[in-house]
Each structure stands twice: as structure tokens, then as C-alpha cells.
Amino acid sequence: MIVPKPNVKVGAWKTIMVVDPDPDNRKRVVGLLREAALRASDSETATPPPANSRTLAVHEADNGSAAWALIEVVKPDLVVAEILLEGISGMQLLRRLRDRYGGDAPAMIFVTSMSNEVDRYWALRNGATAYVIKPFDDDFLRTRATKFFEDRVESGLDLDSNWVADP
């Protein structure tokens, strides 16, 4: 189990959390999200953060319980999670976020091996921003994440920007 260790960067532009039991999947998703954040901050349409705060604070957890403990310490802007997690499932994590923070809850993207349409339906109905089925194309997730970061910059962190899509 990964023990939650906050690595909060003062003045961080965005804070993300990646929750997946597979360390290789976490590493891949973190890399894609970092690329997406850089693309968004360099976009002509996006207003980049001040030069001294162009950082992306990244937190990782390998199960839902560790993720929830870390969320209590560092409220991320975005959570990317597998649905199949030990302790607290990804769906339970989503519900807890919505119950605890309401409309101010972090955006949540599921990157999951659950390919059932019913699971996708319930995830989106319960407030997930997007539902990506593994295996996925790197460009697919990178493009959607870039759009997420651009929307968040342009709208002042408006959670209503909905860009749900299928690969």
C-alpha cells in the first residue's frame, strides 16, 4: 500500500491525483497528464498561470482508501481513477467526493478496465467528467486532459465544462 504523503507545492497551478493499483498505469497516466497540463499552459487560448506557479502537483495512490485519506489533506482539481480499487471503489470515491464537496468537488475521470455500458452510464450519471476504457490510446487521454486543463484555466476552474467522449 502506498502511504499518503502530501507533496503540496506552494502556488501549484493544478493538483491532480491518480489512483490505480498498477504502478505502470499510474506512471503512464501521470506522464500524459503532465504533457496535457503543459500543452494547456502554452495554448494560445489559455491564460497561463504566473511563471512562478507553473507547476503541477501530482499525488498517487494504489487504492481507494489511501486516495480518500490523501484527498482529505490535499483537495485535487482532478482525480483520475480506476473503478476496481481495494478498500473504497472508484465509484464510492466519486460519490464521497460529490457528497463531501458538492458542486465544488474535483473533476473525476475514470480510466478503467470496466467496459460495461451500465458501469459507464452510472459513472457519468453520478458526476464523472469522462469514462475511458483500458486499453486506451495515449493521444485520446492526452487530448481530453489538455481540453480539461484549458477549460479550467479559461473558466476560472468551472466544473461545468463537460467533455465526455469515447475512444
Image (tube, rainbow, N blue to C red):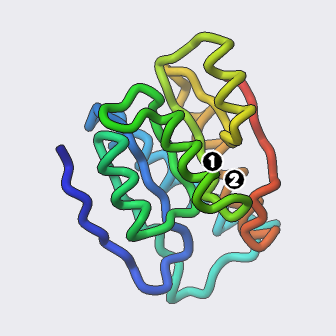
Q: Which mark is residue 145?
A: 1
Q: Is residue 156 left or right of residue 137?
A: right
State the residue at coordinates (82%, 66%): 45
Whether residue 47 is situated above or below residue 52 in the rendered picture? above
Q: x and y percent of residue 83 in the render?
A: 47, 29
Whether residue 97 is situated above or below residue 143 in the rendered picture? below
Q: Quadrant of the N terminus?
A: top left
Do labels 1 and 2 touch, CB within 8 Å? yes
User: How would you rate the neighbour count of disc 2 (Cα within 10 Å): few for under 14, some for 14-19, many for 20 or more?
Assistant: many
Q: Inspect the image, locate mark 1, and give the three-letter code of the amino acid beneath it.
A: Ala
Whether residue 37 is situated above or below residue 117 in the rendered picture? below
Residues at marks 1 and 2, CA–CA distance in whole angstroms:
5 Å
Q: Quadrant of residue 10?
A: bottom left
Q: Secondary structure at mark 1?
A: helix
Closer-to-camera residue (64/48): 64
Is residue 16 visible in this depiction of the protein? yes
Q: x and y percent of residue 20 in the render?
A: 36, 37
Q: x and y percent of residue 140 in the render?
A: 63, 32
Q: Quadrant of residue 124?
A: top right
State the residue at coordinates (28%, 32%): 22
Whether residue 148 is situated above or below residue 64 in the rendered picture? below
